[in-house]
Image (spheres, rainbow, N blue to C red):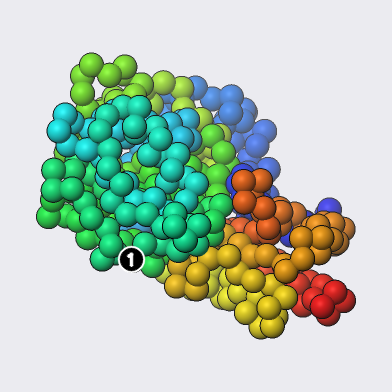
Amino acid sequence: MTKRAFNFNAGPAALPLEVLQQAQEQFVNYHGAGMSIMEMSHRSKEYEQVNNDAQSLLRRLFHIPDNYHVLFLQGGASTQFAMLPMNLLQPGRPGAYVMTGSWAKKALKEAQLIGETAIAATSEGDSFTRIPSLSDIEVPAEAAYLHITSNETIEGTQYGAYPNVADHATLIADMSSDILSRPVDIKQFGMIYAGAQKNLGPSGVTLVIIREDLAASSPKHLPAMLRYDTHVKANSLYNTPPSFSVYMVKLMLEWIEARGGVSQVEQYNRDKTNLIYDAIDQSGGFYRGVAQAASRSTMNITFRIHDAELEKQFILQSEAQGFVGLKGHRDVGGLRASTYNSVPLESCRALAEFMKEFQKNNG
């Protein structure tokens, strides 16, 4: 078999070899149907079973209460940036946003096109190297919701705990880059959304977990495809779904369950990222973490080398040794290792060893 790359891409990202092999085995002939899942009608009983099984697995793994709907939509989290305010903003009730980095800013920019917004807190003054303190978040009393980005993929910051705003607003979270990486109290949120291509599967499908009262309040003047109630009523089958992507999400959820569930995955993720953070912290300043320690992400490790030319050499030499995706986002530069659920411990150990060797040769 061809040697697997050490894949640290930020998304689309690594998938477990076992999941890829299972999909490969079923690719041409899905459960004896004589055709691939990609060739089946989304109205067939075989695909409806895939759709329902994926929902059930997610409910079980993420402990989703019965009064929440699970939807598989399209358009990525970027479409949700607009669909969310279209459905939930009301006159005189702004959407409040916590500014934590690039993706939070994009979510706010879209909402500003739809209706009234407010900034509840920001860490822009610290170049988005931290998550604002929960005590610094000020939600307007009349706010329709408070939106957070639970993990900033580009800056490498992540919430350690979530704001408690249940008394006067609905908490909404973009969890695209840390969904199912740790247990979450779903009841704390009115809605969670996430693109699948980092922790849940391939690109093409977007997960929405929404409380039933919020879904039911979709304004009737919106186009059908942009209303949550449309997709609830149709069980995510209103239009042709991204069927193969949903099928891959189902396999990913089965993989997470086989590993012991979300709590076990969380510990595994911490063990993985600690290897890399230790290499940074014990480097004597050769490497410097970008995110402040209290806000460090377990999904996206952002770091710099004191010399920009050495960063270029780091990229070139790492690529020559089979490492992929370590170049920082084009907007911020530097270096980044994305260590999502499917990235093996062995890849993180190999990166930590490479970092130590690189420092030894260039320190």
Q: Is residue 306 left or right of residue 254?
A: right
Rendered-image quadrant of the N terminus: bottom right
Q: Is residue 228 or residue 84 the one in the foreground?
A: 84
The mark total stands at 1
Q: Residue at x 45, y 39 (%)?
A: 106
Q: Is residue 164 visible?
A: yes
**Residue 247 location (% of width, % of height):** 52, 39
Q: Is residue 250 visible?
A: no
Q: Residue at x 21, y 51 (%)?
A: 139
How many residues crowd mark 1 within 10 Å: few (<14), some (14–19), many (20+)? some
Q: Residue at x 54, y 56 (%)?
A: 155
**Residue 184 location (% of width, % of height):** 34, 61
Q: Is residue 261 or residue 302 the one in the foreground?
A: 302
**Residue 326 location (% of width, % of height):** 71, 57
Rendered-image quadrant of the C terminus: bottom right
Is 350 above or below relative to 157? below
Q: Residue at x 18, y 31 (%)?
A: 90
Is 363 above or below relative to 123? below
**Residue 72 location (% of width, % of height):** 41, 36
Q: Is residue 319 left or right of residue 114?
A: right
Residue marked by disc 1: 133
Q: Is residue 130 or residue 144 the one in the foreground?
A: 130
Is 111 above or below relative to 25? above
Dot 1: element? loop
- Point out the residue furthest to the front here: 125
Which residue type carries mark 1?
Ser
Q: Is residue 271 or residue 174 the one in the foreground?
A: 174
Is 348 above or below relative to 31? below
